[in-house]
Image (spheres, rainbow, N blue to C red):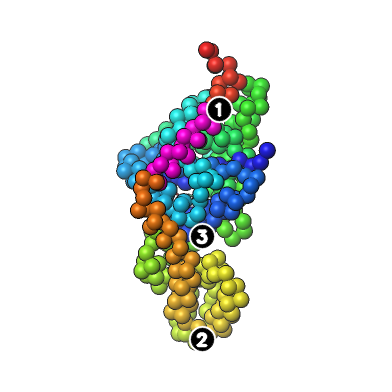
Amino acid sequence: MGNVILTGDRPTGKLHLGHFVGSLENRVKLQADPNSEMFIMIADQQALTDNAKNPEKVLASVKEVALDYLAVGLDPSKSTIFIQSQIPQLPELTVYYLNLVTLARLERNPTVKSEIKEKEFGQSIPSGFLVYPVSQAADITAFKATHVPVGDDQQPMIEQAREIVRDFNRIYDTETLVEPDVMLPEKGRGRLVGIDGKGKMSKSLNNGIYLSDSAEEIEKKVMKMYTDPNHIRIEDPGQVEGNVVFTYLDIFDSDKEKVAELKEHYQRGGLGDMTIKRYLNEVLQDYLAPIRARREEFAKDPEYVMNMLKEGSEKAERVAAATLAEVKAAMGINYF
Ligand code: ATP
Ligand code: MG
């Protein structure tokens, strides 16, 4: 049996280059592997756990994320792309799993802890938010995922899922559930810095380049990119470490020799920020133009996109229903 991969995104906006480097490009690679079957979930239910008061943002983003997927080359004939809320077996599994997890365990989850602080919930933590790691365990196990590609921040979720699998299989004396393995990003791919150089590229920090950005928007963002604040005159020697232009060139320019040369020249002095920015702009334009063009084509056919999501969700539901039936049989709650 091959690998079963579960992955996805919370629809809370359009996807940016951070998502591309952190996960999308890897999914496109995995999709070509004949030994892997991939389920890609648009996690609208999870997005609602901290967006209950503005559901419009989540609902509108479902379509945007689907367009971003198609634009980067995720192919519904190879991977199953589906919407979480359309699979009723997922919350059903969640309910059973919730009995296996203590409140103290949920409150200890380090990622949830820091998100609670970040989101300034104070004393008003939505209970759906606190338990989202359990719902994530349902998503993973419903498809019997063997592998879950995640960033560092999501490791505690996989650990929680593994605990639930082990507890369930032990308590009900079964081998129904499959313990998932994490798949961490390749070196240098886990975390793309934002154009301001301050932290990771993030929607909420407003420091992102989006897959859907126009050529003009990309150029504007490149021109205000953080470089080396001490590189004032062209002839000054400049720093390439922490210089966002060079960070992006390392990732997006396939001409490694040229990048090495530019770095050397910049460090020696005599290479201006405008020159390297114009060059990066060309590189990014070449990189993003075909993605944007595909996105625009798919955007012209919303019926195709919705139908693709419907078919993907129907397939996902069949798989989840089969697992749920096994789970209920293992628990002995298959009365009729
Ligand atoms: P928000 O500002 O709302 O937190 P975001 O832009 O950080 O949004 P998320 O929805 O939090 O995006 O990201 C979901 C997942 O996408 C993360 O768990 C991570 O795996 C990946 N990701 C997000 N930003 C980056 C980034 N800059 N580099 C690499 N991966 C990223
Ligand atoms: Mg984030």
The amino acid beneath tag 3 is Leu
Q: Which mark is residue 192?
A: 3
In this figure, which residue is indicated by the disc labeled 1?
Answer: 322
Other-residue count near label 2 (Cα within 10 Å), few / some / many at <14 / 14–19 / ≥20: some
**Mark 2 C-beta to ligand 1 under 8 Å:** no
Q: Residue at x 49, y 62 (%)?
A: 193
**Residue 59: x %, y % from top left:** 35, 43
C-alpha span from label 3 to label 1? 38 Å
C-alpha span from label 1 to label 2? 65 Å
Indicate left or right for 265 with 45 as reference: right
> Helix or strand or loop: what does disc 2 sit on?
loop
Question: Which residues are drawn in magenta?
Answer: 305-322
**Mark 3 C-beta to ligand 1 under 8 Å:** yes
Q: Main secondary structure of the magenta part?
A: helix
Magenta stretch: includes residue 316: yes
- Which of the 4 image quadrants contains residue 181? top right
**Residue 238: x %, y % from top left:** 52, 79
Q: Which mark is residue 270?
A: 2
Q: Residue at x 44, y 65 (%)?
A: 289
The amino acid beneath tag 2 is Gly
Magenta stretch: includes residue 104: no
Q: Residue at x 57, y 69 (%)?
A: 254
Tell me whether the residue at label 1 lies in contact with that at label 2, contact meaning CB atoms closer than 8 angstroms: no
**Residue 231: x %, y % from top left:** 48, 79
**Residue 81: x %, y % from top left:** 48, 43
The amino acid beneath tag 1 is Ala
Q: Which residue ends up furthest to the top in the rendered image? A: 336
